[in-house]
Image: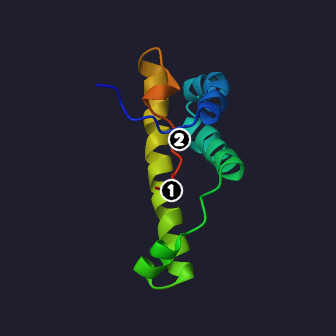
Amino acid sequence: MTRRKWTTDEQEAWLEQRKPAFLEANQKKTAAKDFFPAVVEEFRQKWPVAPVTEQEIADAGSVELAKRVKQNKYDKVNNSCARLQGKRWLTHKHSAHQGGFPIIRES
């Protein structure tokens, strides 16, 4: 069974372009300090979190809280997937179809 794809095709290509920089940073043992923060920031700028929905506002009780909850969820998933992406790049030939930085899709 294959894993659910976390990225769009555009995001996948964008991440794959950064693979050599990750491998270099990892060899220097600077991936956590230098590589991931910069890549996550770029990713956030290019693909920001979607606006909150009326249902999310109702569930949270306020617009501000709904935004905070959604951003926290996005950041948590983004960070854990970034670590997994790095491990996959190190352990075997990797296709971003197997994981990576997620996008939060509205259903």
Task: Report the amino acid beneath label 2.
Answer: Phe
Q: CA distance from mark 1 to mark 2?
A: 16 Å
Residue 2 image point, x, y percent: 34, 26
Where disc 2 sits, the SS reads: loop
In the image, farthest residue toward the left: 1
Residue 16 image point, x, y percent: 61, 25
Task: Report the amino acid beneath label 1.
Answer: Glu
In the image, farthest residue toward the top: 93
Query: 29 or 104: nearer the eye?
Result: 104
Residue 73 image point, x, y percent: 45, 60
Q: What residue is drawn where x is 63% and y is 38%?
A: 35
Query: 105 or 66: nearer the eye?
Result: 105
- Left or right of residue 75, residue 47 in this image: right
Give the crowd class for mark 1: few <14, some 14-19, many >=20 residues within 10 Å.
few
Q: Which residue is mark 1?
A: 106
Q: Which residue is mark 2?
A: 101
Q: What residue is drawn where x is 53% and y is 64%?
A: 71
Disc 1 or 2, which lies upstream in sequence? 2
Where disc 1 sits, the SS reads: loop
